[in-house]
Amino acid sequence: MPSTVTQKSSVVGVRFQKLGKLYHFNLGNHEDVEPGDHVVVETKRGRQLGQVMAYIDPNDVQNQRGLQPIDRKANPRDLIMKQVWETKELDALISCREKANELGIKDAKFVKAEYSFDGSWLTFHYTTENKKLNIGRLQKELNRRFHTKVELRLIGPRDVAKILGGYGACGAPRCCSTFLTEFSPVSIRMAKAQGISLSPQEITGMCGRLRCCLVFEYEQYVEAKKTLPKVGKRIGTPYGVGKVKDLRILRESVIVEMEEGERYEVFLHEIEPVEELEALQKKADAGCSKHENGGCDCGAR
């Protein structure tokens, strides 16, 4: 991801939604535009109003010449019109759902209607598991109903959860609807590295996908785990020699079981590498394998 810079730059990152991703644009002749300002830009979805979030280092942007320039700085009328059209979005969503029901479209869920700031573009976000769903007729009906450019945009389960908001399994507001601007890839490996139960209730979010929070501490767990012995390894402890049964990664400790069956928590600074010390002692006792009759000068002893 291109890095942001504090000094003035010819490239800026513009965000069109509160928690949306950054899109890069060229300042062009609008050198008075600064982070925090609202601007009007031309996109594939028509003219859009967005907010400049930061300057972007041009050296980190591929194909800088292909960047669209900022059309103009937004004026107070643009901001008011954006608020006016936002008040019409709920009615538009209800109309879309009613029309879809009339046309017998049952296996699609319409979750959000979104107008462009000037009302020239209307996007309906929907989700469905039916890959063969034909919504062409619905789009034609909506075009006639709203007299504007209508787009039906298919989104995934995580985007649906982001739009709907609500609370996660932890009891706090969902990460995706409070601070996440992009979704990072999540895998089962991340849950295993953190010692989390692999039951669906423990690792699945409200969207039905792996929880985004599995990414947050994954790297710290991986780094911390490198300093601890593996499960099943014999180690020396203040209580004697035992076998590692479990890891307490963030505490930098392990649970050790003694031969008598007793278990203790042993911290990293208390661990002695018994197996490694035994291997070194065995090698030292074996002597030099190259000079069996003495006279060794190879440093094996």
Image (cartoon, rainbow, N blue to C red):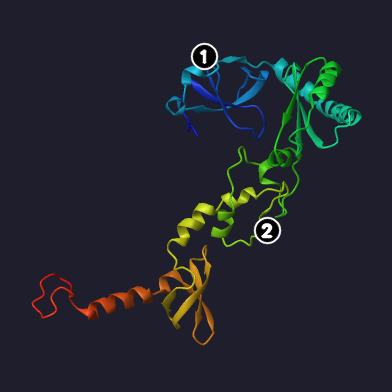
Which residue is identified by label 1?
Answer: 28
Q: Position of residue 156 (x, y in %)?
A: 70, 38
Q: How crowded is mark 1: few (under 14 residues within 10 Å), some or many (20 or more)?
A: few
The first of marks 2 and 1 along the sequence is: 1
Q: Residue furthest left?
A: 295
**Residue 264 image offset from top left, x and y in percent:** 52, 79
* Dot 2: element: helix
- Tag of residue 202: 2
Amino acid tagged 2: Glu
Contact? badges 2 and 1 (CB < 8 Å): no
Quick one: 33 or 127, which is closer to the camera?
127
- Secondary structure of the residue carrying tag 1 is loop
Q: Position of residue 127 (x, y in %)?
A: 75, 36
Number of the front mark, 2 or 1: 2
The answer to whether 230 is drawn above or below residue 137 in the figure is below
**Residue 177 picture quarter:** top right
Number of marks in picture: 2
Q: Residue at x 68, y 53 (%)?
A: 204
From the viewer's perspective, tell me whether residue 118 is left or right of residue 287.
right
> Where residue 147 sits in the image (x, y, percent)?
82, 14
